[in-house]
Structures are given as C-alpha cells and as structure tokens.
Image (cartoon, coloured by chain):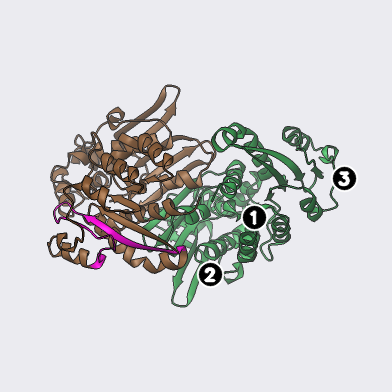
Chain colours: A green, B brown
C-alpha cells in the first residue's frame, strides 16, 4: 500500500472534475493499484487556498466552492500568500497544475511546475503553455530528480495521445500528423453548415461555455497552433513555438462558402498538420475543404481527431468524441497513475 | 547495454517482416534503448529450423528462404526434431510465436508459449488463438516468473489496442466496444459497392493474399468473433470463447442489397460489438447498415476501427489504415520493447 499526498492548483471545472473522479475511483485505486491518497492542498482562483497536512475533506471543499464560499476556513496551516507559497508549503507528492493557459510565455504555470519539481513533486498539468514553452527544461528537471512531468490533457483532453506515443509506440518515428484539434472551431463550422451565421455560431459556443468572451484564441487558430507545437515538440523531438506554426483561422470563411461546400458534398475544417522534411518540421493550421473519403470529414461538433503517420504503422488515427471536464480530468488522473507506477 | 537473444517460431510474411524490422531498427535499439540482440533460432514451416547460440545471420536466413532454400545449413546445433524441441533448445530470452491460428483450441501455439515461459522466455505472439484459449493461464504463468505474455498484433495488426488499454488507460473500466475488425470482409463489401459480385470480391481478396483458399474463417465471421472474444477476455476481464459470440457472417448479403444501401447513402459493414450488462457480457458479430454519421461509415477497404466506451472518456476510437505484414511485425517489435523495459 502506498499513500500519496496530492495538491490541486486550479479548482475550476477541470480541477473540480478531477477531485470528483478521485473520490469516484477511491476503491479502484485501493484494490487495483494498492494506492491511497489524501488532498493536502487546494488553491482556487477566486475562493482562496487551503492546506491541511492531514488531508482536506474533498467533498466539503467541492460543496463550499459550489456555494461560492471560500476554502480558507478549511486551512489548518496559515493561508498561503500566493500560488508559489502554496506549492512550497502544500507538502504533496503530486501537484496538479490547472491554471489558465498563457500562449505566449506559458507563465505562471511554467514556474509553478518548476517549483513543484524542485520540491520533490511529480508535476502534472492540463495546460499547453508549459509544454510548448518548457517541455525540455521541465522534463530534464524531472528526470534528474526521479520525478515525472506529464501533460496528457494538454491536447485532445484526456484521450491518450502523449502516453500513446510514449508507452505504446516504442522505437517508432513520427513522420507527420494531421488533425482537428480545436473543438470550438469545429463546432462553429458544424453549426454554420446547419444554417447559422459565424456570429450566431460563436455566440452559441460562448453560451455553452466552450468559447471565451474573446473568441480569438480559438477562431484565429492560436489554440490549434499551440497544440500542434506541443505535439511536434514532444513527439517529433523538435522544439517548436506556436509563433512558428503557419496559422490561418476561420474568420475568413463565409456562410456562403460553407453552404457551397455542403452542396458539393464537402466540408470546411480547421486542419492542423505537421510534417518532418529535409529542412526540419513544417507545421500549419489552416481551413481546408475536406471530402467524404477523408477521415476528418465525419468528425463534427466537439469531437476531435489526430492521425499519426509513423515509419512503422502507416496511418493511425485517434478520435475522441464529445469530451467534457471529466474527460480532461481523466487525463490528469491517468498521468498520476502513470507517474507513480513502478519503472 | 543489455543483450537479448531472440527466437522466431514461424517465418512466413510476418516473421520475415519482423526480422527485417529488427535489422532496420538496430541503431534505434542501440542508441535509444541501450539494447543489442542476436537471433539464436529460427523455425520455419517449410524451410526447416536452425539454432545458433552465437546468433544466426538474419540477412542470410531471409535470403535463403526467399530462394526456397532450407535454413538447416545454418544450424550450429543439431537441427531440432520439432517445434517443442526448438523452443527448449533455442536458449532465447524472447520467443516470437507466429504459427497459424487455430480458432477452436489455440493449439499448438498455446503449448509453444507455455514452454517458452517455462524456459524463462518472454512469450510474444500475433496469434489470436492462445489469447482466447489461454490468456489467464499464460498471463499467470508469466507473472509468476517475472516474464511477459504480450500479443499486441492479435487484433488490428500492430495498432496499439491491448497496450493502449494496459498502459494508457489506467483505472478505466471498459463498458462497451464496437468496430470493424476483419479487413477481408470489409474489403469484400467495399468492392461489392463498386459493382463486383460476392464471388468476384472474394476471388480478389484471395488473389492479393488476404483471404484463404477457404474464405469461411473471414466471411462467416469466425476471425471477427475470435477478435471480439480476445478483446472482451483481456479488456473486460471476462473470459469469453469465440463460440460464445453471437455470429452472423456476410454470405447472406446480396449485391442488390449492397447497391440498395448505397443508393440510400448507407453501407453494409460486418460490425463487431460487445457490451457489459447486468448478465455479463453480450458479444456479437453481424452485418449492419451504417449511416454517414457513424464513424464506421468511412472505414473502407482493409482499414479497421475500434471504438471503446469507458466510464471515464466517452467514446475513444482507433483507426488503422491499410495495414500489411510490416504493421503486424511492428506490434511484435513493440511487445518486445515493452516486455523488456524496466518496471
């Protein structure tokens, strides 16, 4: 039996879903993995932070936040001054970092993860920023300390992408990849096919909470570019910044073009691709017309797909249908189990 | 640096492709995995067997077989009497078992793998028979000896299916699965859509070498049923024999029905499915009419797909496009690396 002390930095939809998943899977962890856990710290953006070396009551923390209450009443130790103080004092074995993404620098998530590793914790995140801005640094730091830096949920939520490559495709070389990695634009284009205008479709995505008030991160292709950069950096071993991905969003696609494509039996998709060539890796995000014989054609709404071309397998495609916060939470949960398993 | 002695039992298309892949990946093994290997034994169905404790010349063995020559001239030790004698004397660390499948009993592959494990070798196979007829026995035997019984290529060639579940989906529970797992019937149905009769399509599959002289294993759904039984046995933890899979093949589907489906925008597919329910697992193989909104619709020719519904991820689909012997060989190669890696 091994006991792990966990800490959550970020307690929004994903952090809360992870807390619930951990509670749901308590018996599975115990009986299948000989693992018990306690939550020694939770840090939220708007409901304060709490540290209890003996373990917080996770159900009560979930309830408090759902009622808009602060977590500070649960803190046995003095309430941390800031997130850095939180990480240094939470005394956890594993830090789950789920603060908002910063496309340009990866901060402050990058520093959060560094401090976690420096303090002997496995560093796990759903945040793409530190992957594209710090993959090599964080991986080397983790390796030097016998720890793991894992980030399965950074691309395609909790679907196994990075772990697929790391654990199941040994000795394979990735030659190219192609996919639909931004679900907001995919849903916008799907709804435009059903007759909505671009603005109506964006408004719908904002209403159901998958697009931000400022939708430019999605519609201008930034989110997709960061994901391509993360895949190339990790799976092709070639450091690539989002700014180096050739990027065109979907603002230029009119309702008329969408409807003309439909009448010709085709669909506009925001396609992500990267290819290893003689001069390094070429990566791009751009709208493409897709025909029914493409595996991308049938991928609608918030479903996403990635196709990997390796030197050993031909094309291998992974499709994740209709993800939600629990899906992302599962990626973090799987990272935890993969980080602590022997070997 | 670790040196592994390998032995190949079965040296047809897949065994030869594995030998070539090992030669191709020699540098990768050395530089990325600190692994060297020698081939201490090769047993063929029609070109004899050879054992050399110092390592056979794999390129010369490939050449000899391609010229229809026997391997026996290469044997430094006395030529084995039979496959069992071969396994006992090949002195390998890893046995790759690639003899023909036996749907009903899994023999003699099952005994081959048992003897390999008893003699301290990791047991790796692309053969579905021993998975459905001996998974628990072989896995327990391997575990007791600190060895591995792996069989990635038994379903969907070398695409990561079993390793996906084992390595990347920890703590997940498989609720149901659905897929197109037999590429011969999928190709037959695709060609019937293009206007061929059933007999013409079968003849084509025989011509390109993917269907047997007696095509009943494919067209009556046996191959698909064995694969469903293997997935259920391993991934749902419920032992299931192929005979327990409700099974209907594609002989009953006429050219008229295929063409009527096409004109209605639909396709006949031989669908494999299994579902966990209150009374255990219900598994079946049967032709189904598939509409364009199904991920199965676009899967044509020899491409295959499987969709997994788990308690944590919603639907996760894996698509393998246009496999060949090298794809299957890669599954064996990946099993080898996964079997010998620390942990």
Q: Are marks 3 and 1 on the same chain?
A: yes
Chain on which label 2 sits = A
Position of B222 compared to A47: left or right? left
Using residue B116 as the reference point, say whether residue A52 is left or right of it. Answer: right
Chain letter, disc 3 residue: A
Q: Name the residue under label 1.
A: A127
**Badge 2 and badge 1 in a common chain:** yes
- In the image shown, does B286 or A301 lie closer to the viewer? B286
Which image quarter: residue A290? Answer: bottom left
Percent x, y for residue B156?
34, 47
Residue placed under numbered mark 3 in the picture: A78
Of labels 2 and 1, earlier in sequence is 1
Q: Residues within 10 Å of mark 1 (few under 14, many from 20)?
A: many
The disc, 3 or 1, on the residue closer to the chain's N-terminal end is 3
Residue under the image location 27 percent in, 31 percent down: B247
The answer to whether marks 3 and 2 sit on the same chain is yes
Q: Residue A238 carries which label?
A: 2
Name the element at disc 1: loop
């Amino acid at each position: 039996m091994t006991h792990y002390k966990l800490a959550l930095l970020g307690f929004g939809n994903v952090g809360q879903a992870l807390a619930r998943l951990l509670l749901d899977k308590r018996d599975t962890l115990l009986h299948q993995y000989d693992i018990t856990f306690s939550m020694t710290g939770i840090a939220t953006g708007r409901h304060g932070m709490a540290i209890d070396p003996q373990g917080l009551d996770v159900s009560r923390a979930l309830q408090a936040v759902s009622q808009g209450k602060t977590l500070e009443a649960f803190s046995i130790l003095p309430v941390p001054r800031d997130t850095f103080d939180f990480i240094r004092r939470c005394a956890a074995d594993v830090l789950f970092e789920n603060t908002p993404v910063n496309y340009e620098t990866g901060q402050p998530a990058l520093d959060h993860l560094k401090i976690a590793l420096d303090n002997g914790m496995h560093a796990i995140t759903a945040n793409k920023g530190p992957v594209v801005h710090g993959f090599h640094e964080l991986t080397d730091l983790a390796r030097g300390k016998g720890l793991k830096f894992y980030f399965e949920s950074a691309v395609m939520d909790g679907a196994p992408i990075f772990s697929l490559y790391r654990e199941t495709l040994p000795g394979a070389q990735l030659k190219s990849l192609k996919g639909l990695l931004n679900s907001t634009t995919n849903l916008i284009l799907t709804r435009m096919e059903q007759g909505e205008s671009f603005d109506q479709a964006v408004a719908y995505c904002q209403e159901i909470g998958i697009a931000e008030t400022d939708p430019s991160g999605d519609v201008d292709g930034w989110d997709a570019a960061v994901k391509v950069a993360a895949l190339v950096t990790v799976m092709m071993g070639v450091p690539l910044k989002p700014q180096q991905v050739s990027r065109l969003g979907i603002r230029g696609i009119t309702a008329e073009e969408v409807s003309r494509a439909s009448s010709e039996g085709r669909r506009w998709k925001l396609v992500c691709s990267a290819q290893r060539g003689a001069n390094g890796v070429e990566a791009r995000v751009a709208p493409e017309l897709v025909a029914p014989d493409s595996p991308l054609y049938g991928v609608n709404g918030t479903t996403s797909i990635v196709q990997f071309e390796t030197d050993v397998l031909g094309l291998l495609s992974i499709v994740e249908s209709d993800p939600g916060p629990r899906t992302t939470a599962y990626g973090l949960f799987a990272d935890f189990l993969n980080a602590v398993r022997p070997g």
